Image (cartoon, rainbow, N blue to C red):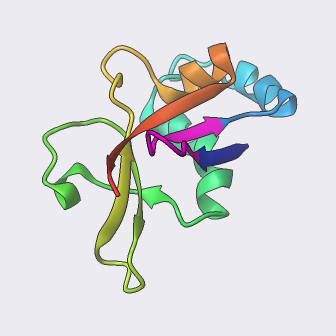
Amino acid sequence: MKHYIEPISGDLRIKIDPSELTELRELAESDDFNSDKVLGDVLEHMLCNSEYQWVSPEELGALTDAPILGTYDATGTNVIEAWWYPRYELRSPQQDLLEHGECVFKVAYR
């Protein structure tokens, strides 16, 4: 799984490779494929090997249930960057990864 910040928009783009697509196809057979639990499983490797972490909407004063990724300051208490998945009520990031090989978390602030 590769991820990068779009230079112009500042959005966080996440892409999967063919072997990860095969794994995702297996997960897609489950009834809870679009759940937050499966999203956590899908992004676990990226989150464990980068500065990105899940951010709760309350930390940002956001009124949403959308998945939010962010980075924290050195103390780990203040969010310094955040990206959200705005289409969460219609789709899931894992569905985008399955169908398009990538998903985009829109920049909330940087």
- Over which residues does the magenta segment extend? 5-14
User: Residue at the location (45% across, 29% down)?
Assistant: 35
Front residue (pair 84, 10):
10
Single out the residue that lies furthest toward the front. Answer: 8
For the question of whether residue 29 can be seen, the reply is: no
For the question of whether residue 9 can be seen, the reply is: yes
Q: Position of residue 71 (x, y in %)?
A: 43, 64
User: Residue at the location (56% across, 20% down)?
Assistant: 96
With respect to residue 87, does 99 lie above or below? above
- Asked whether 7 falls inside the magenta stretch, the response is yes
With respect to residue 107, does 101 lie above or below? above
Single out the residue that lies furthest toward the right. Answer: 19
Q: Position of residue 45 (x, y in %)?
A: 68, 53
Front residue (pair 31, 76):
76
Q: Seen in the image, is 47 located left or right of residue 56? A: right
Q: Seen in the image, is 93 located left or right of residue 76? A: right
Q: Position of residue 5 (x, y in %)?
A: 55, 48
Q: Quadrant of residue 1?
A: top right
Q: Position of residue 101 (x, y in %)?
A: 69, 23
